[in-house]
Image (tube, grey):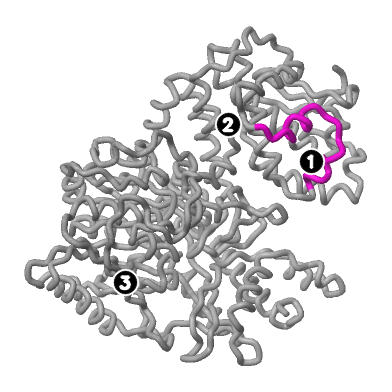
């Protein structure tokens, strides 16, 4: 063909560059960052054959100018072609199996199409193109539907010797013939689903990068970074290749063990520390409930400290009850019902705040917890004490002094769980807990800003040894929640669980571990200076804003142990605040509305304003979602939160340049200023909320 040039080298203005098309084209191309990067594949446009679409294996993709003139259509076709090239490269010596490439690429493109925003899909509704017709047919992969794939052969022109779908391909296609952004939102529950307008989930974030938003929502959930997404997408390519070479099961087990070993390396944990991945922090609580039940023959009492600032489903999970209407393995269940195989337990809730909404003192909390444990111990029950190391509002309880006191109780049978779900901990803190025999729950999705829903249990040597020797099985109902592969392979207790793999959980953990790795590459001195610098700025900025009021005072400092060394655990990194309008606190509903408005482009509401105001209104600002808290003792309200996340540090440490590092942190401090200005802008236009 003539007049074929790489697409990125086109500089002549065509109809694509008409003013009304440019904005739309740019918006569509932003989504191109979720398309896999395949080395040495050129994307070439043809003007001489404007309707052409051709895949040259291992070399290029040729797309006609008429397809490029319809950006959404071009995006879908390119997504198919690049996925096809990815699988073809993975085939290695088995190049004759190109039928697999057709099948996998179409499956991925179908899911990719379903994840497009509603207005993009509308632009494809009336188009008559083979690929669009096939992906609109929402039939999932089946032997009966394989005949349709023969229609795709002309795209690459290769003769497929056989149209037989090999049995060994099935688990590979079912698990990995999915876009990475889809994997990052699978294997959790319905809260990870995104809406079809803004492509946001319940937590206000996306399973693919959202670089246009200012994001300081690490106390809740964060959109995956470009860096972590690219690394995770690359891992998917590697897994496809390894699965074809060594078998799907072997490649998956190897990947799971690699993730666990990487976590051990990052936090300097010994090999005897067992790690159990879970789809969420609440699932980790359900795992604890199950483990406790098979270890102890005694009646069990869970003492849940910070019950008002832990996950909403934790109490149900500890009781062995369904905490949502769908499990992570996509089984429909009824929220609140008992899970089969769990026995009854007692649960004592100890909230941070009293009935009037006032924060309890450290000594008051210690006394309540001690009294609960003392009475439970007198009854001869096994105590499971759930302590809190950094709640969603930045508090800790009980104190370290309390732990020393409770250990003096006569004949106490107790297991301590540390809720470290925020993971605002240094490696030495985690090591300290495990050395004391505590089980630690962590997530990769809070401080380290991995995608929402990546939980894990860290089990010390003594607990692992006890479970390993147990001859009981985990509760039968857990087959709806976990696969056998999620648990240590040497444990007898989990042999009855389902076969299969939760790739969503694995991929989210991969993204989180990528963030952990680059965070710890920042030298500790600069890391700690950057943390203090940034957190001091947030606190001062909120204090100076007359329309905001920090929820905490000096009595609520987060450090709970005596240490001369700086540590992330010693400094407040979550900043919750009330929002005031005319010196009156906003209602719960209005705080939630403001949170949504803050995370949206409001420029259309300010068309007649100055350019500065329009830009401010357009900026999407994602911060920690609303938490209901009383203002004073009688006014129901809620707080929002601005939090330090690991990316503030890791994305500032570039090129190992100290001066650039602090300048980059200052740039992110400027983003905090913009967030506060946008809150003020929204408050000055009450019609937006009302």
Residue 177's disc is 2
Locate the C terminus and report the quarter of the image it occupies: bottom right
| Highlighted range, magenta | 120-139
Place of residue 593 in the rendered image (x, y in percent of width and height, measured from the top left): 65, 73
> Could you say whether the residue bearing mark 2 is in a helix, strand or loop?
loop
Place of residue 205 in the rendered image (x, y in percent of width and height, measured from the top left): 59, 57
**Label 3: which residue?**
305
**310 over 197 or under it: above or below:** below
* Dot 1 crowding, Cα within 10 Å, few <14, some 14–19, many 20+: many
> Could you say whether the residue bearing mark 1 is in a helix, strand or loop?
helix
Residue 123 falls within the magenta-colored stretch: yes
Note whether residue 646 is visible.
no
**359 over 177 or under it: above or below:** below
Q: Earlier in the sequence, mark 3 or mark 1?
A: 1
* Residue at screen point 33% across, 68% down: 388
Note whether residue 500 is visible.
yes
**397 over 233 or under it: above or below:** below
**Along the horizontal axis of the image, is 623 left or right of 304?**
right
Residue 72's disc is 1
* Dot 2 crowding, Cα within 10 Å, few <14, some 14–19, many 20+: many
**183 over 582 or under it: above or below:** above
Residue 138 falls within the magenta-colored stretch: yes
- Calculate the distance from the C-alpha at mark 3 to the C-alpha at mark 2: 43 Å
Q: Residue furthest left?
A: 410
């Amino acid at each position: 063909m003539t007049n074929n040039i790489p697409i990125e080298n086109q500089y002549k203005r065509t109809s694509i560059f008409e003013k009304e098309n440019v904005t739309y084209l740019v918006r569509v191309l932003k989504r191109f960052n979720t398309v896999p990067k395949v080395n040495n594949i050129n994307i070439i446009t043809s003007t001489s054959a404007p309707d052409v679409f051709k895949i040259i294996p291992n070399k290029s993709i040729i797309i006609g100018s008429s397809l490029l003139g319809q950006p959404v259509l071009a995006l879908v076709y390119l997504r198919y072609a690049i996925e096809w090239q990815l699988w073809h490269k993975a085939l290695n010596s088995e190049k004759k199996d190109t039928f697999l490439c057709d099948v996998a690429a179409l499956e991925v493109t179908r899911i990719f199409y379903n994840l497009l925003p509603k207005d993009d899909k509308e632009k494809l509704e009336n188009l008559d193109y083979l690929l669009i017709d096939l992906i609109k047919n929402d039939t999932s992969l089946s032997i009966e539907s394989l005949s349709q794939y023969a229609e795709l052969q002309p795209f690459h022109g290769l003769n497929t010797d056989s149209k037989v779908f090999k049995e060994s391909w099935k688990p590979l296609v079912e698990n990995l013939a999915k876009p990475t952004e889809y994997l990052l939102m699978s294997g959790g529950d319905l809260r990870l689903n995104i809406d079809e307008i803004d492509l946001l989930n319940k937590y206000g974030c996306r399973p693919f990068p959202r670089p246009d938003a200012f994001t300081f929502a690490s106390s809740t959930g964060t959109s995956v970074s470009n860096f972590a997404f690219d690394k995770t997408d690359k891992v998917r390519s590697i897994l496809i290749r390894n699965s074809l070479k060594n078998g799907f099961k072997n490649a998956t087990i190897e990947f799971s063990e690699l993730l666990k070993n990487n976590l051990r390396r990052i936090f300097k944990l010994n090999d005897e520390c067992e790690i159990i991945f879970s789809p969420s922090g609440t699932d980790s609580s359900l795992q604890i409930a199950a483990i406790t039940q098979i270890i102890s023959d005694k009646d069990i009492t869970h003492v849940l400290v910070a019950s008002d600032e832990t996950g909403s489903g934790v109490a149900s999970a500890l009781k062995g009850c369904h905490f949502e209407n769908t499990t992570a393995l996509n089984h429909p269940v009824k929220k609140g019902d008992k899970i089969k195989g769990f026995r009854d337990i007692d649960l004592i809730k100890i909230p941070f705040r009293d009935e009037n909404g006032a924060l309890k003192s450290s000594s008051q909390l210690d006394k309540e917890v001690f009294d609960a444990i003392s009475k439970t111990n007198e009854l001869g029950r096994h105590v499971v004490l759930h302590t809190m190391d950094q709640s969603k509002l930045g508090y800790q309880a009980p104190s370290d002094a309390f732990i020393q006191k409770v250990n003096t109780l006569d004949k106490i049978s107790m297991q301590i769980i540390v809720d470290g779900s925020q993971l605002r901990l240094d490696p030495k803190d985690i090591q300290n807990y495990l050395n004391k025999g505590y089980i630690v729950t962590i997530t990769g999705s809070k401080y380290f800003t991995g995608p929402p829903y990546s939980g894990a249990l860290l089990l010390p040597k003594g607990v692992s040894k006890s479970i390993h020797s147990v001859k009981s099985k985990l509760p039968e109902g857990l087959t709806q929640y976990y696969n056998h592969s999620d648990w240590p392979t040497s444990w007898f207790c989990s042999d009855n669980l389902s076969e299969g793999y939760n790739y969503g959980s694995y991929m989210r953990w991969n993204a989180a571990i990528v963030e952990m790795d680059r965070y710890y590459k920042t030298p500790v001195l600069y890391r700690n200076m950057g943390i203090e610098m940034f957190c001091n700025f947030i606190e001062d900025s909120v204090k100076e804003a007359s329309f905001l009021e920090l929820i905490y005072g000096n009595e609520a400092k987060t450090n709970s142990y005596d240490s001369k060394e700086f540590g992330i655990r010693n400094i407040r990194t979550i900043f919750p605040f009330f929002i005031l309008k005319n010196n009156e606190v906003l209602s719960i509903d209005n705080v939630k509305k403001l949170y949504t408005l803050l995370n949206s482009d409001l420029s259309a509401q300010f068309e007649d304003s100055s350019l500065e105001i329009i830009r401010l209104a357009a900026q999407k600002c994602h911060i920690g979602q609303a938490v209901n808290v009383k203002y004073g003792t009688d006014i129901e309200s809620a707080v929002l939160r601005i939090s330090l996340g690991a990316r503030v540090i890791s994305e500032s440490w570039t090129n190992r340049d100290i001066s650039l590092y602090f300048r980059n942190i200052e740039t992110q401090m400027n983003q905090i200023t913009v967030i506060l200005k946008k809150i003020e802008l929204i408050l000055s236009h009450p019609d937006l909320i009302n």
